[in-house]
Image (cartoon, grey):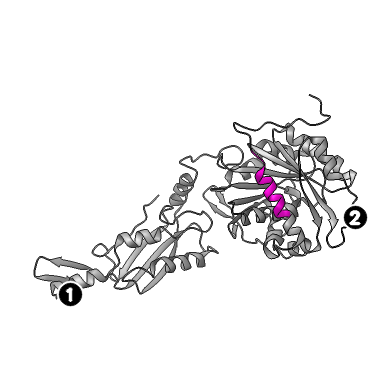
Amino acid sequence: MTQATHEGIGQMAAPCTVKVRLRGQGGGSWGNQRFPHALAATVLAMQPSREEITKALGRVIDPELKKPVTELGMVRQVDVNGEHVAVTIALTVPGCPLRSSFEDQVRRELLPLAGVESVSLDFDVMSPEEKAALTTRLRGGVSQRSKGISVDRSTRVVAVASGKGGVGKSTLTANLAAAFARLGQRTGVLDADVYGHSIPHMLGVHQRPVVVDRMIVPPVRDELKLMSIGFFLEDNAPVMWRGPMLHKALEQFLSDVHWGELDMLLVDMPPGTGDVSISLGQLLPRAEAVVVTTPQPAAQQVAVRAAQMAAKTEMRLIGAVENMSYLVGTGDELFGSGGGEALAGELAVPLLGKVPLDPALREATDRGEPLVWERPEAEGARAIVQLAEAIAKTRREEGGFRPLPLAGARS
């Protein structure tokens, strides 16, 4: 990676740069003109120092990679011309949609410096060699892909699963992620529901991921990172993968995503126990699972199968969730009652929470706005935040994960 270049006074060859050089006791020179020593020293004192500019740019954070631009080697050049500082930043891709974030940050950090009256920012694009070096740096010096998802051991990976579609699993996952972010956790969401990907719409994320060399950088909304197979499909096209091809595609997809530093990664699993769920179970190391059901027995019974599959792929079951428990405002149990308790009892896990059927949740989701952000006082939003707090209180086993015993399962 080319080192970030910070050119100071007396070091730049560009014609727009002020150059000051002291000449013994007799004075100094500026271009081809001579000035008294005191004036040259005054001009020098008015200039911001190289160290001050470098330190200030170290507080400019890439909004997707979440690291300083100086650490990422993105600062191409800094020119100081009197009281004006011109900065050039090399982006990973041309036409980066987050350019305005860099502009705001550079001005915010440089304008308060003594001697700086104006700031300008230009953009360049990284070379292929710089991108490859950046990828290796972000992966901790390892250039090869690793099998399965790559996250730090301190990151909790929680798979949200269900036995069948239509129980509100994806809506819960999207709002749970927003709830964890609201609770101050660095959160990511992996939309792994390959055939029914919908999380980008629910979170209002339409920006595509950035591909740097062989590394995929997830788009970010309000500090929430998101990755979905839907980002790589055109015009809502269906996914038509099967068998070994499906497993290989998922493995490459998961291993190429760079999540950075996360406290919590939520995975929206596909419903049921098909090939996709089995492959994902094998590619999600140290994962825990939450199983979602609705109150009626039909949903509860098939949810047991999803839990058993999660356990067989060495996920640790941490609890059950009952969704659509009752209609807000009336308390009517439109789908019966008792399904959550029955599921938790059969799996020998706690019932982590009950989430009501709230029309406001559906309306907010259709607009791409998590209800827990848009209307945190809503009954459905409060229930989801309480569910996030309950999940956070469950403790992860040290030294790996052990599947919990399933009631009625054969040993």
Left or right, 162 with reference to 27? right
- The residue shown at (59%, 37%) is 147
Residue of label 2: 334
Mark 1 neighbour density, 10 Å: few (under 14) some (14–19) many (20 or more): some
**Which badge, 2 or 1, is on the more N-terminal residue?**
1
* Left or right of residue 36: residue 339: right
- In which quarter of the view is residue 50 placed? bottom left
**Residue 155 seen in the current view:** yes
Residue 3: horizontal and vertical position, in percent? 36, 52
Which sits in the foreground, 252 or 100?
100
Residue 39: numbered disc: 1
Q: Which residues are magenta?
A: 384-396
What's the distance in space between the residues labelled 2 and 1, CA to CA?
A: 83 Å
Quarter holding residue 116: bottom left
Q: What element does badge 1 sit on?
A: helix
Q: Is residue 175 left or right of residue 32?
A: right
